[in-house]
Image (spheres, rainbow, N blue to C red):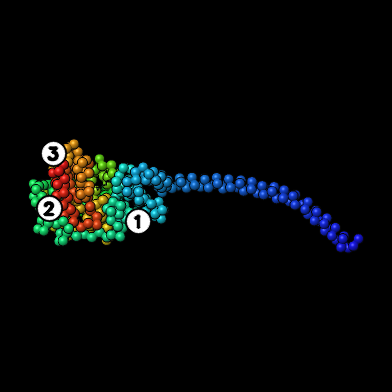
Amino acid sequence: MAKGVIRRAQSTAAGASRSAAVPVLVAGSAALAGAVLYQEAKCEGTVMSYLDSISSRLANVEAALGINFTADLEKIAAIKVSHPNNLAVKHFDVNYFNTLSVDQKKRLLQIVKSGTSNADSGMGCYAMNPADYDEFEPFFSAVLCDYHKVPASQKHVTDWSLDGVKGLPASGILDVRELGLPPLSMRVRVGRNLADFPLPGAMTKEDRVSMESKLSAAFDKLKAKYGGRYYSLTPGSPDFINDDEYKALVKARFMFKDMAADTYLADAGIASDWPYGRGCYVSGDEGFIIWVGEEDHMRIMCMNKNGAIINDTFNRLKESLDTVESIPGLTFAHSAKYGYVTSCPTNLGTGMRASVLMKIPNLCKDGTEAKAKVVCKPLGLGVRGMGGEHTAIGADGTCDISPTARFCISEAEIVTALYTGVKNLKSAEDKA
Ligand code: CIR
């Protein structure tokens, strides 16, 4: 046999034997792979159970430290669906939330607490500290743009000058008698907060008492200039008044009610520690009043129960406010972009509400302000009861009417809007 044939035969035999080994090898590999997979699965099961255990222990640690946000985030997700008009919840962006530090996460959840506890909120949040609007800018900017219908880039500018304001009569005088109305009860107020205290939702009882002491001492300057006195609800205060005196002040609209009945304020922490740190200054002629410790540290207002010219009340407020602001040690919380800082974003910027009590019996024939609200909304006016928000209107159809805009509008534009609004409302009332 030729050497080549033998070599070929051997090679063929070797090839045959190699081919025969393949299934054995495959079967062996499969068994090995199966064993590996089994081991891996077993291992994976163990890893999974370790991960589960770590995760559950982590959840316990987070819960103990108060940093487990799952329940809050689930609640927010549910309210987004059930109450799409709750602005704070609507604009609560989980991706933004996840970029915040643990401390900021807790604080943002506190800011939206009123809205998560009261799903039917229209706004749903309150700032807790003077710097909140700037610190949580992405959140507040979205809420403010939606509520106030202004672009995010718009900066609030303070301006009390009536010069050139659209809608101002040629005389520059906002006289309601020119509209065929009798003198009215009118009031202009601004919300102001001190820069060196937390806002009311985040104040401790000690903060409230110490802020009131600071203000009541500062009000000595007001007493010297305008007469009057400071009334305090804080037990032990030298200016303390009893319950009957307090009720009489509420009846005269000089003092505010216990806010605990307002669940939005209560859940925000704004109504806490009642009656500590609460009180009011009333000038000698009772036309200049400062509430202390309500929704903002101060609500500074001028009122005239029988006034014809809105300018008088407006100018008096400006003069009184300048006096308060000039008292050494009092610095109002202010943001370069957002103007004067208030607890509620609805008041931000001017913090101003200018209102009149106006009789509109035709629009309130059914004993409620429901129809008046429908008519007033497109006129840029809000309607409240005689005692403020969520109170009843007068039996004779008297309602509290005020322009709703407060932000990215000037103070002068607000009072002019009140005059124009009253004019338009009178015309709607005459036709009703
Ligand atoms: C809400 O969100 O509906 C309540 N927190 C009330 C908002 C209006 N706030 C106000 O007028 N200051």
| Label 2 CA crowd tier, 10 Å (few <14, some 14–19, many 20+) | many
Amino acid of disc 2: Ile
Residue 410 % position (x, y): 20, 57
Distance from the alpha carbon under mark 1 to that under mark 2: 38 Å
Residue in the picture at 75% in, 52% down = 22
| Local SS, label 2 | helix
Quarter of image, res 159? bottom left
* Residue where numbered disc 2 is placed: 310
Res. 249 image quadrant: top left
Give the mark nearer the N terminus: 1 vs 2: 1
Kind of residue indicated by mark 3: Asp
* Numbered badge on residue 396: 3
- From the viewer's perspective, is 172 left or right of 329? left
| Foreground residue among 290 and 161 | 161
Label 1 residue near ligand 1, CB within 8 Å: no
* Pick the front one: 21 or 57: 21
Q: Do callouts 2 and 3 mark residues in contact (Cβ within 8 Å)?
A: no
Which quadrant does the C terminus fall into? Answer: top left
Of badges 1 and 3, nearer the viewer stands 3
Count neighbours of disc 3 (C-alpha within 10 A) and say few if under 14, some if 14 to 19, many if 20 or more. Answer: few
Q: Residue at x 55, y 45 (%)?
A: 49
Q: Local crowd at mark 1 within 10 Å, few (<14), some, or many (≥20)?
A: some
Q: Earlier in the sequence, mark 2 or mark 3?
A: 2
Q: Earlier in the sequence, mark 1 or mark 3?
A: 1
At 22% across and 44% down in the image, what residue appears? 374
- State the residue position of label 1: 138
Q: Mark 3 falls on what kind of element?
A: loop
Residue 67: where, in percent of width, then height?
Answer: 41, 49
| Residue at horizontal 23 percent and vertical 53 percent from the top | 406
Mark-to-mark CA distance, 1 and 3:
46 Å
Identity, as a three-letter code, of the amino acid under mark 1 = Pro
> For this view, does 20 lie left or right of residue 417?
right
